[in-house]
Image (cartoon, rainbow, N blue to C red):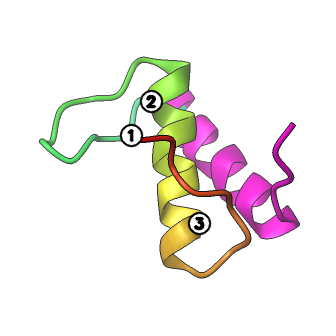
Amino acid sequence: MAKYSEKASEKVGETMHEMKEGKLKSGSGKKVTSKKQAVAIGLSEARKEGAKVPKKKS
């Protein structure tokens, strides 16, 4: 199992909260309803901030 930093898990938690409130939007501007998509957005944002997150699977 991949190890994520504490900062990354906090970011994922924030995006999940936004999704549940209906405020999370995808890159195209549409509302996110999928949990998987919310997690992916959270990890992506954490990566941009420099948190320890494993590479995307290609």
Percent coordinates x, y for residue 27 in the rendering: 21, 47
Disc number at residue 46?
3
Q: Which residues are magenta?
A: 1-20
Q: CA distance from mark 2 to mark 1?
A: 14 Å
Taking the image as shown, residue 32 lies to the left or right of residue 38, namely: left
Give yes or no for residue 13 being in the magenta stretch: yes
- Going from N to C along the chain, the mark reached first, 2 or 1, is 1
Give the residue furthest to the bottom: 50
Q: Nearer the viewer, residue 7 or 58?
A: 58
Query: Foreground residue, 23 or 58?
Result: 58
Quarter that holds the C terminus: top left
- Choose between 23 and 28: the one closer to the eye: 28
Q: Quick one: 46 or 29, which is closer to the camera?
A: 46
- Whichever of callouts 3 and 2 sits on the residue coming sooner in the sequence is 2
Residue 13 pos. (x, y %): 71, 45
Could you classify mark 2 by the number of other residues whose Cα lies within 10 Å: few (under 14), some (14-19), or many (20 or more)? some
Q: Is residue 17 magenta?
A: yes
Q: Could you tell me which residue is drawn at 57 percent across and 37 percent down?
A: 39
- Disc 3: CA contacts within 10 A as few (<14), some (14-19) or many (>=20): many
Tell me whether the residue at label 1 lies in contact with that at label 3, contact meaning CB atoms closer than 8 angstroms.
Answer: no
- Label 1 vs label 3: CA separation? 18 Å
Number of numbered labels in the structure image: 3
Q: How many neighbours does mark 1 have within 10 angstroms: few (below 14), some (14-19), or many (20 or more)?
A: few
- Between the residue at mark 3 and the residue at mark 2, the CA separation in whole angstroms equals 14 Å
Query: What's the amino acid at mark 3?
Result: Ala
Residue at mark 1: 23
Q: Secondary structure at mark 1?
A: loop
Relative to 32, say whether 40 is above or below: below
How would you classify the magenta stretch by its main secondary structure?
A: helix
Which amino acid lies under the numbered mark 2 shown in the image of this protein?
Gln
The residue wearing badge 2 is 37
